[in-house]
Amino acid sequence: MLPATMFMEHDDIYQAGGQQHILLGPKIIDPPEGCRSNHDVICALAKRLGAQHPGFDLSPRQLIDQTLQSSGWGTLEALEGQRWIDCQPDFRQAHYLDGFAHSDGRFHFAPDWSSIQSAVFGPKDAKMPALPDHWDVIESATDEMPFRLVTAPARHYLNSTFTETPTSSRRHVKPTVMICPDDAKQLKVDNGDPVRLGNGRGELTITAEVTDATQPGVVIVESIWPNDAFAEGKGINVLTGADPSAPVGGAAFHDNRIWIRRL
């Protein structure tokens, strides 16, 4: 499956982020020997598994052309001539001067979840507030697990692609758990001490970083460190959940309760 082709090594189509354009990403150079595109890998898997779909028999260019036509945006040939398609609606529609796309034309602060209550996850007796507010269906702290864990990306780690660059590694040195001074005092933990974090999902060892940047009861492990950066080869995600969250599933980021023990 790896290595994959890079964006200049295969034909693709892109929807812009923060703007209203469709862009063509044509193949410009041949990839190094052995590299395969996502499309090639998916089609090869489908063939081995016996999966049937019209897209598996199309080349990337044919797939782009069919996608454009099915979406009402013309043909690949036309896009190649234009280089991009501006999908921005006219001024009145783009600025909602004639209302929003609901039957009453108004903006709705809350969706009508009653129509999909059968898909609600979480406690069966949990009732969503009528207006946006806190909904107590999270992993609240307990006496056994009194800390809430946040696993936000580290400042110099944009995503997993840039995790192990020399510059990022020098700046972050190693994984740490950020603990506020009051909590550290109660735990009898000093800056640089090894501590044990755990919950019902797993446990791991990590170095404590005592800092006033965190709130009492909340600890932060800045990610995205690879598993082998941790003492036992187990990364921070052994503590994070993949359970579907209310109201209709999806990831509950940073919704993790843990215990902390000094080693």
Image: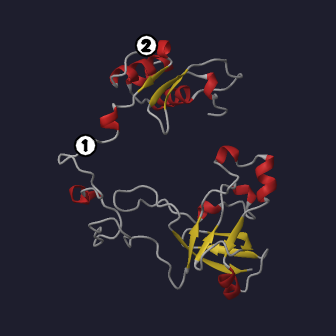
Q: Nearer the viewer, residue 204 or 135?
A: 135
Q: Residues within 10 Å of mark 2 (few under 14, many from 20)?
A: some
**Mark 2 or 1, closer to the camera:** 1
Q: Quadrant of the N terminus?
A: top right
Q: Nearer the viewer, residue 204 or 136?
A: 136
Give the residue at mark 1: 101
- Mark 1 element type: loop
Query: What residue do we see at 24% from left, 57% from top?
Result: 112
Q: Residues within 10 Å of mark 1 (few under 14, many from 20)?
A: few
Q: Position of residue 211 (x, y in %)?
A: 71, 74
Question: Do callouts 2 and 1 mark residues in contact (Cβ within 8 Å)?
Answer: no
Q: Quadrant of residue 132?
A: bottom left
Give the residue at mark 2: 78
Q: Quadrant of residue 174?
A: bottom right
Residue 58, compared with residue 187, is above or below; it is above
Q: Amino acid at mark 2?
A: Ala
Q: Position of residue 138 (x, y in %)?
A: 43, 70
| Residue at the limit of the structure toward the left, as seen here | 104
